[in-house]
Image: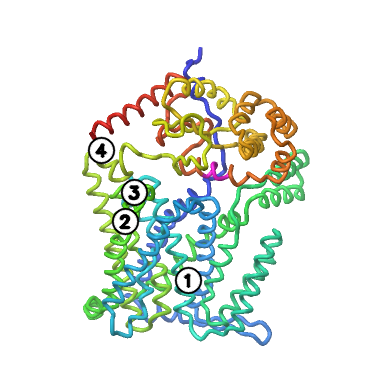
Amino acid sequence: MADRSSLWRDRTTWSRERAAPLRAFLWTESGSAGVLLAAAVAALVWANVDLAGYESVWHAHFSISLGDTQVDRDVRTWINSGLMTLFFLVVGLEARREFDLGDLRERRRFALPCLAGIVGMAVPASIYLALNAGHSSAHGWGVAMSTDTALALGLLALLGRDVPDRVRVFLLTVSVVDDLIALAVIAVVYSDGLDFARLGIAVAVFAALLVAAVRRVQRRWVYVGLGLAMWSALLASGVDPIVTGLAIGLSAPAYSPPRERLEQATELVRSFREQPTSELARSASAGLTSALSPNERLQTFFHPWTSYLIVPLFALANAGIELNPDFLGTAYTSPITLGVLIGYVIGKPVALMATSSVMTRLSHGRIRPPVGWAAVLGSGTIAGIGFTVALLIADRAFSGAELAEAKLGALSAAVVSSLLTWMVYRLTGLLSPARRIQALQGDVRLIQDLIPEVDPERDHIRGPHQAAITVIEFGDFECPFCGQAEPVVRELLGGSDLRFVWRHLPLPDVHPAALLAAEASEAAAAQGRFWEMHDLLLDHQENLTPADLVRYAGDLGLDVERFHDDLRRHVYETRVAQDVESADVSGATGTPTFFVNGQRHYGAYDLDSLAAAVAAADAQLRSAGDDRG
């Protein structure tokens, strides 16, 4: 006979072919760091074995002609201003995804990363300017600004093996702001001889691209043609054409697949299964692809190419400098090298720590880093790696010996910042387990596996809003295990100072009616009847057709016409998608998944197990109160 407790451990698995966008982005960035590092080392070895050969390869010219028009640049420029456009396309895509679905969609969560990104660039640049005041090299202040996201995340994974994912997410969020500002600096400060007529053409082409995106034009050649036209116009205008990538990336919306598209894709796949022909295979493939947002399609295609090929190729073309004793002796006393080195190594961690501390105090703790002091310091030290963008700006700001000095400063900063990060996490590892957790994740009594934390103005809360204990469930209205857990939750609510929060995690690949049911609950919430609809849906899990949902709305006395219109237009699709993204970054991999006071509950979800978790949370709070007393 099966163990009875196993009945309360079953979950509907969240089956996806790959990780959700944010985690996939982190994995790709971290994994590519080794390739980037190997390319940089290869460039240094090559330059010190055969500097003339190294330079001759990258200074070889390559031209493209179209009628009477010809673009002639050396190989290094084609990489720096051509291929790197695709790198900044990915930067723009990730920024847009964060604004649409990630932490940056909430102003309160946007405030700290935004300010940390700005101050984290201003302080190193100020240090550089202070050391180069009165010198012509002062105009290279942009070199000492931007963090290399890929290398920083990769080395963080290597140097801080026990670092929680939340630390990487925090660093990535700050880096998104960092990258956006760096591109603006390149476009405004390091572009010469502007031709406003051609700049106007580039703006007009971009406007046409936006129109195509809004109208959801599916033909790829339209976007490729407009992108190339914009890049060419910017190149001719004097503005660095890599801005093209950022602009296109920011214009690509991120959203969860619309239900109609999913249903259409399902029908195409079903047709292929019934009649497996090459034509239907192409149709099914196209249908599945078109269901995804433009943002996700572009990231899926370009991110591996930029991370594993383009950025390492950039490093190979730009990191090579000759390291002889005479040069090193001169460079390490040069204000350029020292400005870049000290700006990154000292400026970045000081800026991040100071910004986090000041924001926490000024907001009385409402705005604070989602990690502990050691994690903030470690994020600051690893942010001192400014390899890619630093070399990109150095190539535009300097030439000759000054360029070599700037490159040495960036390379040295990467090495020193890596050592400092290793020291931070090595020393943190020597702390007692309780203090180590607190240093990495913040107040041990307030560890939050849940991201974002409960927001009474946004979340659906049952019970006293100011209750001491909060139980959060990620659920699916069609999931039988969620229905099984519902009586347990209701019994818990009857006898504790407890509030219950429901967040959506519909699993349409397993439960085809779940997504529309989640939208129906939100449509009911808009009319003040979320919990009544919630209870009806879980009580009637076998009857969740659109007609059933409309009938439930009538039973609850809702404005049925408004309810039906909200479902037809999928008004609350984004609201549901935000809960799904929260599930992903919080580590919820199936339904139901419970959190108690922000901490993941890993046990069974029968009454005794959940009651024990609630009692433990209550004891923690009482202990915390005794400590403060």
Residue at 66 percent across and 61 percent down: it is 213
In this view of the protein, which residue sits in the foreground, 160 or 174? 174
Classify residue 312 as left or right of residue 375: right
Element class at badge 4: helix
Q: Which residue is mark 2?
A: 358
Marks 3 and 1: in contact by CB < 8 Å?
no
Between marks 3 and 2, how big is the CA–CA gap?
10 Å
Along the polypeptide, which appears first: circle 2 or circle 4?
2
Q: Which residue is mark 4?
A: 433
Q: Quadrant of the C terminus?
A: top left
Residue at 51 percent across and 20 percent down: it is 7
Q: On the image, which quarter does residue 221 sit in?
A: bottom right
Q: Residue flagged by tag 2: what amino acid is it? A: Val
Element class at badge 3: loop
For the stretch drawn in magenta, the main secondary structure is: helix
Which residues are drawn in magenta?
577-581
Q: Residue flagged by tag 4: what amino acid is it? A: Pro
> Dot 2, crowdedness within 10 Å: few (<14), some or many (≥20)?
few
Classify residue 69 as left or right of residue 474: right
Q: Nearer the viewer, mark 1 or mark 4?
A: 1
Along the polypeptide, which appears first: circle 3 or circle 4?
3
Residue 124 drawn at (x, y percent): 32, 68
Between marks 3 and 4, how big is the CA–CA gap?
28 Å
Marks 4 and 1: in contact by CB < 8 Å?
no
Element class at badge 1: helix
> Dot 4, crowdedness within 10 Å: few (<14), some or many (≥20)?
few
Residue 471 drawn at (x, y percent): 45, 31
Residue furthest out toward the top = 1
Q: Which residue is mark 1?
A: 184
Q: Which residue is mark 3?
A: 364
Residue 467 drawn at (x, y percent): 42, 31
